[in-house]
Image (tube, grey):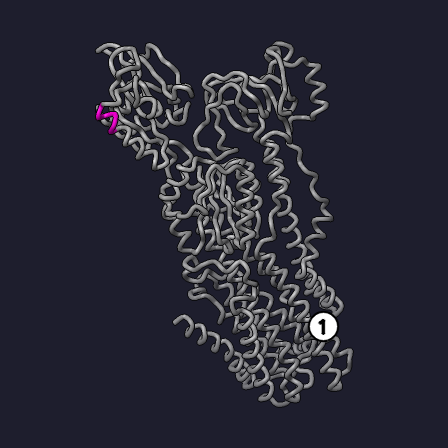
């Protein structure tokens, strides 16, 4: 309802009841969440999950119930994580209800009364006082020095003064003065309701890792089916019974699928989340960990994120009477007070003046008691100044404080005074820095005319102490930092200049929630992976729409619930640390893929090339599954816990369109696969009658050696678990050809100590080649 009418007596109880029935309660409707079955089904149609389901079915048909159970547990864990992640949007919408006022003070039946805010209807006459949350969208009918904190909705750091006839929006807070107004919109139609709609509509995209793994799953599915069909056809053509070749082909399919990948991903993300939490970055979903490593743009809110979120005196320039005299006069002509804990309350700019005075070693109460106020002319939008008259030992003293263009002009001061000209010049300089400037003048008597200018004061929301260093670190990491704020363009430009952010396309001021959504969407459409930081209600839709939303721990509950990552220390610097952790996680996932897929490639190549060298069926199904279990098991998972490569934060982020096997990884898979194949076939050809056992042993040991060769520099001391996993797995591999019961199960022949030594030596060859190659590349 854009136009409603009421009387000074407000609505009657009957009118309110009829309107409530017609318009519904003043609450934010929460959308009905999808059914659990639908959420689970959405997770299971993922290509890699489908491939794993097929692998579980195959392993169970082969009688390997242990492997089948492990795969099933991995699928269950990842499905649970995905379902939990989808509930965040519902929680973000529900959190908006936390900001609505539980009680509203209204006039009904001609009497002041209090009603639940949910019962407000268009036409209700609402009374507001300092500290009240505006319960619905209103049009003010009366206002006395009413100031609203609108930062949660607009991002504007300073309170806004509202006068009769102006609109105020639900969720804003009265910080000073009082007012009354008529309700115009409630519930979903209010400003808070519109933000709720934006949050619900701003569904997040799949994470970069999810998109890359989905593509990998599709590619692997096609490649595995094709290669296993070739192996089956060649085996049958060489005279091997078709049932035997069917079992071998199916075993190869299982071996080629890195079924430990979800477990490795989950472990890597969980360890990354734990490390992030130790650095005050708390992920609300595991995939937030990796997504940070992909970020190419950080779109940062200003107030409370890059700045301290509080007004303070940034510059005080006296032209007469010195700094203390300027500060005393400014405090005399103000109404802010200090509470028992020494915190300033009242108008934000006047509170900054009190803090500034204390910083000079002066006490506000002492200053005020030494010059009691005799009269005042309150600040208003028309004159843009405040005047007070004080009793001093030397007689009445008049002080005027306000906008420079009204204080530094006739009749308050003499424009021809050189001090006035100097103060005006300083005021322009401070305004160019994005500061809010006030001028102060004082003089004897009781009239605000012919006063002498004392100076000008610049007030602003200062940068956090580490903001400039953080911006520099973000740049070194190859990430672009954009500023998105609801604040004044001059303020935004000044903050951007201090941070070294250049370019109109990187500084966005006076942006409403809808505008933030549009900016995030435009960045994503241009190919960027976007992290959005914020702390207010107005940031929630963009936090949800971004690839990763980062909320300040001290921000609103709405922002925290919409975000993927919460910064407990409210420091953007923590994001840089988290980016490094995300890159580490992604590097480890790629390291596991290089390791696992190279092993699978070697197994397929051995099965394809073996018959060419007279090795009819190089590996039996049980042997294939055994190697798969040993190499993709403990060592594969331990690779997910490797530390970061040196300089992880001094390299650019990977290209958004880069596939998970991109940047040469697939070439590494083929190269290592060929090296493993050569070592394995060489061992078999040198072993005589025990060729299959030698081939089986060499292939398993060689893959374990690759796990050690792919480690980051200095990883041994920080992740001893991988070495332990390799040693245990190597022992199990040797036991498969030396311990009678296990050897019989594997269908292997016994190997002498000499032949085992040859197998071990040949198995070390691929690992040494990889180490030499890495050493050469580092130079």
In the picture, measured across the screen, residue 15 lies left or right of residue 465, that is: right
At 52% from the left and 22% from the top, the residue drawn is 166
Residue situated in front as seen by the camera: 435 or 753? 435
In the picture, measured across the screen, residue 17 lies left or right of residue 373, that is: right
Q: Does the magenta stretch include residue 419?
A: yes
Residue 171 location (% of width, % of height): 55, 29
Residue 48 location (% of width, % of height): 66, 61
Pointer 1: residues within 10 angstroms few (<14), some, or many (20+)? many
Residue 686 location (% of width, % of height): 58, 89
Q: Is residue 418 magenta?
A: yes
Is 697 situated above or below 102?
below
Q: Residue reaching furthest front?
A: 416
Q: In which quarter of the image is residue 72?
A: bottom right
Q: In which quarter of the image is residue 375?
A: top left
Residue situated in front as seen by the camera: 412 or 478? 412
Residue 641 seen in render: no
- Magenta stretch bounds: 417-422
In the picture, measured across the screen, residue 679 lies left or right of residue 53, that is: left
**Numbered disc total:** 1
Residue 487 location (% of width, % of height): 45, 35
Q: In which quarter of the image is residue 496?
A: top left
Could you say whether the residue bearing mark 1 is in a helix, strand or loop? helix
Quarter occupied by the N terminus: top right
Quarter occupied by the C terminus: bottom left
Residue 442 seen in render: yes
Is the magenta region chiefly helix, strand or loop? helix
In the picture, measured across the screen, residue 238 lies left or right of residue 536, that is: right
At 68% from the left and 67% from the top, the residue drawn is 221
Residue for badge 1? 250
């Amino acid at each position: 309802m854009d136009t409603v009418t009421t009387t000074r007596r407000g609505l009657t109880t009957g009118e309110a009841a009829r309107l409530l029935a017609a318009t519904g309660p003043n609450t934010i409707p929460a959308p009905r969440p999808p059914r659990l079955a639908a959420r689970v089904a959405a997770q299971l149609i993922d290509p890699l999950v489908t491939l794993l389901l097929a692998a579980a079915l195959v392993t169970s048909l082969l009688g390997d119930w242990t492997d089948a159970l492990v795969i099933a547990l991995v699928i269950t864990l990842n499905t649970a994580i995905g379902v939990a992640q989808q509930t965040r949007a519902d929680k973000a919408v529900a959190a908006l209800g936390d900001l609505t006022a539980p009680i509203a003070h209204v006039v009904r039946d001609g009497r002041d009364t209090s009603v639940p805010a949910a019962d407000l209807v268009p036409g209700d006459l609402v009374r507001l006082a300092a500290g009240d949350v505006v319960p619905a969208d209103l049009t003010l009918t009366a206002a006395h020095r009413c100031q609203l904190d609108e930062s949660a909705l607009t991002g504007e750091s300073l309170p806004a003064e509202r006068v009769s006839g102006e609109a105020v929006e639900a969720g804003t807070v009265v910080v000073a003065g009082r007012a009354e107004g008529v309700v115009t919109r409630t519930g979903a139609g209010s400003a808070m309701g519109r933000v709720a709609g934006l949050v619900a509509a701003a569904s997040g995209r799949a994470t970069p890792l999810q998109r890359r793994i989905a593509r990998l799953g599709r590619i692997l599915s096609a490649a595995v089916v094709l290669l296993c069909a070739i192996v089956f056809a060649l085996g049958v053509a060489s005279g091997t019974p078709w049932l035997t070749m069917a079992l071998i082909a199916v075993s190869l399919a299982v071996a080629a699928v890195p079924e430990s990948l979800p477990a490795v991903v989950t472990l890597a993300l969980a360890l990354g989340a734990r490390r992030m939490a130790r650095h005050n970055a708390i992920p609300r979903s595991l995939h937030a960990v990796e997504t940070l490593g992909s970020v190419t743009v950080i779109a940062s809110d200003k107030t409370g994120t890059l700045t301290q979120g509080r007004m303070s005196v940034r510059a005080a320039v006296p032209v007469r009477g010195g700094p203390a005299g300027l500060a005393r006069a400014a405090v005399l002509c103000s109404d802010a007070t200090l509470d028992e804990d020494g915190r300033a309350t009242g108008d934000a700019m006047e509170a900054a003046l009190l803090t500034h005075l204390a910083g000079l070693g002066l006490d506000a109460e002492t200053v005020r008691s030494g010059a009691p106020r005799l009269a005042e002319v309150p600040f208003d939008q028309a004159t843009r100044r405040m005047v007070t008259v004080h009793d001093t030992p030397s007689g009445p003293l008049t002080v005027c404080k306000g906008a420079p263009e009204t204080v530094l002009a006739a009749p308050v001061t003499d424009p021809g005074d050189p001090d006035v000209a100097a103060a005006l010049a300083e005021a322009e300089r401070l305004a160019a820095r994005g500061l809010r400037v006030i001028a102060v003048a004082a003089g004897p008597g009781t009239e605000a005319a012919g006063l002498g200018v004392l100076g000008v004061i610049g007030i602003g929301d200062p940068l956090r102490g580490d903001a400039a260093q953080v911006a520099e670190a973000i740049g070194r990491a190859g990430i672009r930092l954009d500023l998105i704020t609801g604040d004044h363009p001059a303020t935004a430009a000044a903050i951007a200049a201090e941070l070294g952010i250049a370019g109109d396309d990187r500084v966005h001021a006076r942006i409403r929630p809808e505008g933030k959504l549009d900016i995030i969407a435009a960045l994503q459409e241009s190919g960027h992976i976007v992290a959005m930081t914020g702390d207010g209600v107005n940031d929630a839709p963009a936090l949800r729409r971004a690839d990763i939303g980062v909320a300040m721990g001290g921000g609103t509950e709405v922002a925290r619930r919409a975000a993927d990552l919460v910064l407990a220390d409210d420091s953007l610097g923590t994001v840089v640390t988290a980016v490094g952790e995300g890159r580490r996680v992604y590097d480890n996932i790629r390291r596991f893929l290089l390791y696992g897929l190279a092993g699978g490639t070697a197994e397929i190549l051995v099965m394809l090339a073996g018959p060419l060298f007279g090795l009819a069926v190089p590996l039996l199904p049980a042997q294939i599954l055994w190697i798969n279990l040993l190499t993709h098991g403990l060592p594969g998972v331990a690779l997910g816990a490797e530390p970061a490569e040196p300089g992880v934060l001094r390299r650019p982020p990977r290209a958004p369109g880069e596939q998970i096997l991109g940047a040469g990884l697939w070439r590494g898979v083929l190269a290592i696969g060929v090296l493993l194949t050569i070592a394995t076939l060489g061992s078999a050809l040198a072993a005589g009658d025990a060729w299959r056992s030698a081939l089986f042993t060499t292939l398993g040991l060689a893959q374990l050696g690759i796990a050690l060769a792919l480690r980051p520099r200095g990883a041994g001391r920080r992740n001893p678990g991988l070495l332990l996993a390799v040693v245990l797995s190597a022992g199990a591999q040797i036991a498969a050809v030396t311990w009678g019961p296990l050897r019989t199960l594997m269908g292997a022949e016994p190997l002498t100590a000499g032949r085992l030594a040859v197998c071990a030596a040949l198995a070390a060859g691929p690992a040494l080649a990889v180490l030499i190659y890495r050493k050469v590349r580092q130079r």
